[in-house]
Image: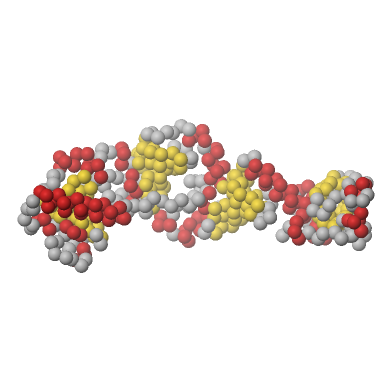
């Protein structure tokens, strides 16, 4: 590992004491400086450099080693750069280093690449569950999974970590174009992004799309929060579970599978992130729910899900309702499991319909309960509607957490 500046041996020679007194000596370099010199002689053991005719520098031992091509074959008269380690060694010469000079120069180049937002090639050396271990310009760095483009992002059904790692390891040996995201020479940290480089090449393609456009694509991955769709020229969009269909969905894989073709509408564009909706291409069945169902109707439905706060019931393929625990029995119950099981066909009474909220309230207890006064029914309905909304909100699918 190249020496850090804090590790470089500081000179304590008499020459150091004279630097501030003699104008000629004051022009000499200081420890840590990168200086240029002409090669006097070069062999496998050492290289001698003439430093502006003022002094001679020597590079020897491990300080000769450097991966940069410019240090490979030096001949007399050639110009070379080296870092000052000591102002005066046992032979009265400057002690220099090609290794440290190359290290400093490499980081300087990387700083320039970041400052100018250049794209550079990164070699993939290894992988772990968090991303790829890379080398850029002879410096080791890291490419996080979140910084991979859609083409290389490991979307694995079920999120199996071992399969994700297997996918990442398949990239070892390849070169990816990347942008430098973060760099710190002192802590020797280098973070890069393949996605950022990809986004730059896709700017013209992204400009072809706008909110409201309808695209057709192929599903590339189905997760518990939605489905990813590839369309156009290697672009990818996400249909969140809440945008897949108008009815309640517990698992997107119940409706879609990888390889399915579908149409969707672009509802949001955030940089390279494209959000889609397939349900917007279909008429909202809740707009005409009043033509099918009315408060007070006795209906038959299939129990889809039993939760601690009630039963989710399918009345038809588009309209689902909720029988809150308070509507399951006129007597106290200890568990909703004692009332019904998933798949069970049952009769219910519709006690509320809210088309704009896509909510329909069902009741079992009202099937055998005498009619109440309008004032009592209204008061009870208001109280229970608030409770139902709070409970259902807990069951609503959450947005995907950002990995970035």
Q: Quick check: can you spot residue 78?
A: yes
Q: Quadrant of the N terminus?
A: bottom right
Q: Is residue 3 left or right of residue 255?
A: right
Q: Dividing the picture into quarters, in which one does residue 369 lie?
A: bottom left
Q: Dividing the picture into quarters, in which one does residue 370 lie?
A: bottom left
Q: Is residue 252 left or right of residue 60?
A: left
Q: Residue drawn at (25%, 45%), measured in percent from left and top? A: 357
Q: Position of residue 262 (x, y in %)?
A: 35, 41
Q: Quick check: can you spot residue 134?
A: no
Pick the residue in front: 42 or 395: 395
Considering only vertical position in the picture, is 211 above or below 402? Answer: above
Q: Position of residue 165 (x, y in %)?
A: 51, 58
Q: Dividing the picture into quarters, in which one does residue 99 lie?
A: bottom right
Q: Position of residue 215 (x, y in %)?
A: 38, 36
Pick the residue in front: 148 or 258: 148
Q: Position of residue 49 (x, y in %)?
A: 88, 50
Q: Residue drawn at (73%, 52%), measured in percent from left and top? A: 103
The colour mode here is: secondary structure
Q: Residue drawn at (90%, 45%), measured in percent from left and top? A: 52
Q: Residue drawn at (76%, 60%), measured in percent from left and top? A: 7
Number of marks in picture? 0
Q: Is residue 227 left or right of residue 372?
A: right
* Residue reaching furthest to the left: 370
Considering only vertical position in the picture, is 289 above or below 207? Answer: below
* Residue reaching furthest to the top: 208
* Residue reaching furthest to the bottom: 334
């Amino acid at each position: 590992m190249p020496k850090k500046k804090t590790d470089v041996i500081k000179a304590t020679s008499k020459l150091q004491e004279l630097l501030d007194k003699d104008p000629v000596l004051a022009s000499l370099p200081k420890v840590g400086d990168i200086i240029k010199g002409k090669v006097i002689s070069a062999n496998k053991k050492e290289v001698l450099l003439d430093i502006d005719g003022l002094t001679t520098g020597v590079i020897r031992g491990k300080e000769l080693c450097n991966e940069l091509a410019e240090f490979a074959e030096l001949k007399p008269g050639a110009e070379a750069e080296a870092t000052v380690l000591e102002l005066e060694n046992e032979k009265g010469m400057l002690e220099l280093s090609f290794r440290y000079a190359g290290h400093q120069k490499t980081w300087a180049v990387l700083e320039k690449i970041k400052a100018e937002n250049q794209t550079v090639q990164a070699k993939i050396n290894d992988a772990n569950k968090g991303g790829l271990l890379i080398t850029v310009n002879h410096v080791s760095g890291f490419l996080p999974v979140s910084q991979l483009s859609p083409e290389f992002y490991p979307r694995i059904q079920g999120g199996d970590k071992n399969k994700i790692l297997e996918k990442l390891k398949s990239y070892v040996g390849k070169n990816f174009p990347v942008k430098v995201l973060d760099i710190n020479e002192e802590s020797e940290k280098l973070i890069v992004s393949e996605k950022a480089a990809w986004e730059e090449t896709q700017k013209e393609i992204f400009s072809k799309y706008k909110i409201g456009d309808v695209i057709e694509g192929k599903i590339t991955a189905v997760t518990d929060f939605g489905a990813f769709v590839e369309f156009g020229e290697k672009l990818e969009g996400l249909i969140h579970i809440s945008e897949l269909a108008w009815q309640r969905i517990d698992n997107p894989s119940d409706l879609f599978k990888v390889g399915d073709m579908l149409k969707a509408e672009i509802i949001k564009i955030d940089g390279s992130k494209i959000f889609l909706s397939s349900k917007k291409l279909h008429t909202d069945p809740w707009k005409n729910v009043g033509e099918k169902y009315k408060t007070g109707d006795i209906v038959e439905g299939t129990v889809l899900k039993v939760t601690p706060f009630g039963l989710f019931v399918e009345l038809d393929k588009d309209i689902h309702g909720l029988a809150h625990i308070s509507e399951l029995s006129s007597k106290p119950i200890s568990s909703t499991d004692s009332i019904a099981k998933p798949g069970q066909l049952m009769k219910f009474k519709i006690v509320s319909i809210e088309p704009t909220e896509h909510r329909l309230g069902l009741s079992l207890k009202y099937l055998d309960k005498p009619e109440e006064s309008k004032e009592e029914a209204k008061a009870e309905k208001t109280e229970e509607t608030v409770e139902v909304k709070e409970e259902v909100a807990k069951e609503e699918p959450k947005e995907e957490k950002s990995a970035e």
